[in-house]
Amino acid sequence: MVQVILLERVDKLGQMGQIVEVRPGYARNFLLPQKKALRATKDNLAYFETQRTQLEAQNLTRKSEAAEVGQKLDGLVVVVIRQAGESGQLYGSVTARDIAQGVTEAGFSIARGQVVLEKAIKTLGLHKTRVVLHPELFVGVTVNVAQSPEEAEMQSKGVDPLRLAQEAAVRDAAAQAESDAGGETEAAEAPAKA
């Protein structure tokens, strides 16, 4: 394990200024290159203490800027058009890249690393996701996965297009069966009259 000083809040690890122990690969491959941490040496501890107020001020500035964007972005609905089977299962999945692209097209520039997906989106419907605008600020974005823009609009109004299609298929099958049964009755009665 390696000790590092966090230069910003890191989710599930700690707050700015904390000294935490992490695996060497995590420090070497993620925290140090992304400038999220420094190795916990005497020189770096002294450097951090001299820079602490400046780092906290920068953090507050970034957080307030992210909060302004977050107010506009919170609750955004992103439509993603995908092909799916009759049961609503997608042929593939919707990824963080797809969501980031949809949010960017809506006028907010975000990277795919800012999209937090708890699990892969593999079905049609409305799915809640989180977007990280700042290490201390998350906003909710709804992903509307549909087969067409018309279906996306129906889903946004709370109508399930798959259920409607299934009900229509059942009604059509019942009507077809009824007309087939009516035709058979008439054919059976015709020879009896002759």
Image: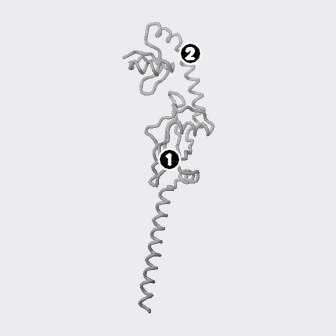
Residue position for label 2: 54
Cα gap from disc 2 to disc 1, whole angstroms: 42 Å
To which quarter of the image does residue 53 belong? Answer: top right
- Colour basis: one colour
Tell me the quadrant of the picture where the N terminus can be found. Answer: top left
Tell me the quadrant of the picture where the C terminus can be found. Answer: bottom left
* Residue plotted at (57% across, 31% down): 67
Judge by depth and name the residue closer to the eye, 187 or 169: 187
- Spot occupied by residue 27 in the image (x, y as percentages of width and height): 43, 19
Q: Is residue 161 above or below residue 63?
A: below
Q: Is residue 126 above or below residue 32?
A: below
Marks 2 and 1 close (CB-CB < 8 Å): no
Residue at far right of view: 107
Q: For residue 126, which numbered disc appears in the image?
A: 1
Q: Residues within 10 Å of mark 2 (few under 14, many from 20)?
A: few
Q: Amino acid at mark 2?
A: Gln
Mark nearest the camera among 2 and 1 is 1
Judge by depth and name the residue closer to the eye, 52 or 135: 135
* Residue plotted at (56% across, 38% down): 74
Residue at far bottom of view: 194
- Spot occupied by residue 174 in the image (x, y as percentages of width and height): 45, 70
Q: Is residue 37 above or below residue 111?
A: above
Q: Is residue 76 left or right of residue 175?
A: right
- Spot occupied by residue 42 in the image (x, y as percentages of width and height): 44, 7
* Residue plotted at (47% across, 47% down): 91
Q: Amino acid at mark 1?
A: Leu
Judge by depth and name the residue closer to the eye, 22 or 186: 186
In terms of secondary structure, where does tag 1 sit?
Answer: strand
